[in-house]
Amino acid sequence: MKRYPHVVVFLFVLISFCFAGFNTALASDDSTSTALQPQEIEGKIIAIDGEHGLVTIRDKERKRHVFSSASNTVFVGFKTLTELEKKQVVTVWYQSNDDGQLAMKIEKKLDAKCD
């Protein structure tokens, strides 16, 4: 029985590619589950629309982010969006979906003013 080293190498490469594709598929499934986890961002308020439940902030990189709030959005440090003011610093935990960015929790940072 003759040995064919090129056939063995070919089969080894073929099997390696199969496993690499399988691992890539597993990694993509894992990334979709982490997309559902809330993300966190901190920034200054630049606009508030209490009537429509929208808050717009500017982050440290000067990017604008618009968040919608719902009845189950948790507010920390205030009770309604109308209590917020422009230039206040907030942290927003949110999820992105087809409709935009939904705020899960909005926390107003404490003012560090000394009189």
Image (spheres, grey):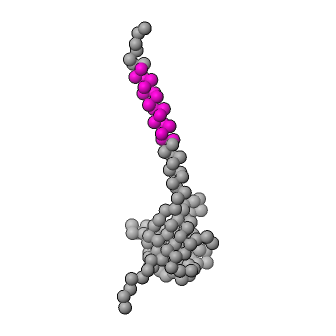
Q: Position of residue 108 (x, y in %)?
A: 48, 77
Main SS of the magenta segment? helix
Q: Which residue is at the front of the view, 77 or 9?
A: 77
Name of the residue lying farthest toward the top: 1
Q: Is residue 17 on the magenta stretch?
A: yes
Res. 6 image quadrant: top left
Q: Is residue 71 above or below residue 110?
A: above
Q: Quadrant of residue 3?
A: top left
Q: Tell me if residue 42 can be seen.
A: yes
> Where does the image place residue 37, in percent across and percent down from the top left?
52, 59
Residue 87 image point, x, y percent = 44, 79
Q: How many marks?
A: 0
Depth check, front residue: 40 or 82: 40
Answer whether residue 46 is visible to the viewer in this image.
no
Seen at 38% across and 17% down, the residue is: 5
Relative to 92, does residue 110 appear above or below in the rendering?
Answer: below
Q: Residue placed at 48% from the left, 36% from the top?
A: 21
Give the magenta-colored segment's residue range: 8-25
- The correct choice, above or below, for 7 with respect to 56 in the image is above
Q: Quadrant of the N terminus?
A: top left
Of 53 and 15, nearer the camera is: 15
Q: Is residue 109 magenta?
A: no
Give the vertical position of 97 relative to 71 (above or below): above
